[in-house]
Image (cartoon, helix red, strand yellow):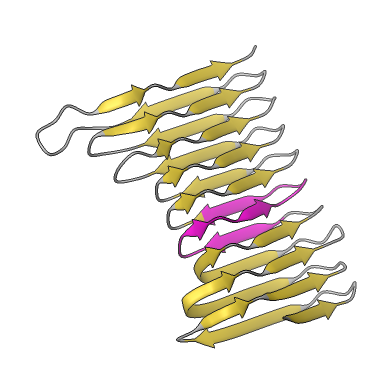
Amino acid sequence: ASAITTGSDSDTIHINGGSGTGLGDSTIISTGGDNDLSIVAEKSAMDGSSIRLEGDGNNAIFLDGDINASEITALGGNDTLTVSGDVDTSDIDLGNGVNQATINGDVGDSAITTGNDTDSIAIFGAVTGSAIAAGNGANTVSVDSDYYALSDSTLSSGNDGSTIDVTGDTNGVIGDSSVTTGSGADTITIEGGSGSGKSGRHLQESCIVYTS
């Protein structure tokens, strides 16, 4: 196992894993500052590894590749996370602040969490066996998939009014899942179609819960 540790100033870390894994069985810790972190790899950006960005800095994290069995934690501050691949068996927590998370792949058996303030979570892939949770604030959460957008999963947003868009395609949108919002003027949009000659099911053994 390897470790990279930086202090409280603003740091830049770029890792190029080439055809292998960018961060494998390793840890990156920063104790503060505005950090710019990027990991590029053809195989996996992170595998069995962790990133922990402490303090109230505004962090930018770019991961070009999949994330497997890993943890990403960014505490206070306004954080931006972009993942170009899938997220599998991993935990992502962006903490409080105006955060933005964009996942350009599937999310499986994982958790993606943001704290209080106005956050954006956008997932361009299927969410399976996972928990997507935005804290209090006027949040925007979207899932856009070519198949079931949510399966065996939970999607939630706290108080203060949220916008939630869930889009599926071929055979349905939400299966064995729940969408929950807190108090405030919320907007929930569920869209889907039909495919393979079968009528699409927008909701199957699922529920939507909101509180006023």
Task: Give the residues in magenta.
Answer: 79-102
Image coordinates of residue 165 in percent, x first then y, are 45, 34
Image coordinates of residue 148 in percent, x first then y, are 34, 39
- 49 up-or-down from 193: above or below: below
Give left or right: position of 212 versus 194.
Answer: right
Q: Is residue 45 magenta?
A: no
- 8 up-or-down from 96: above or below: below
- 42 up-or-down from 96: above or below: below
Q: Examine the image and state in which quarter residue 200 appears.
A: top left
Residue appearing at x 57%, y 49% in the figure: 110
Given residues 36 and 203, the one toward you in this image is 203
- 201 up-or-down from 146: above or below: above
Given residues 141 and 105, the one toward you in this image is 105
Residue appearing at x 53%, y 42% in the figure: 130
Image coordinates of residue 14 in percent, x first then y, are 64, 82
Given residues 36 and 147, the one toward you in this image is 147
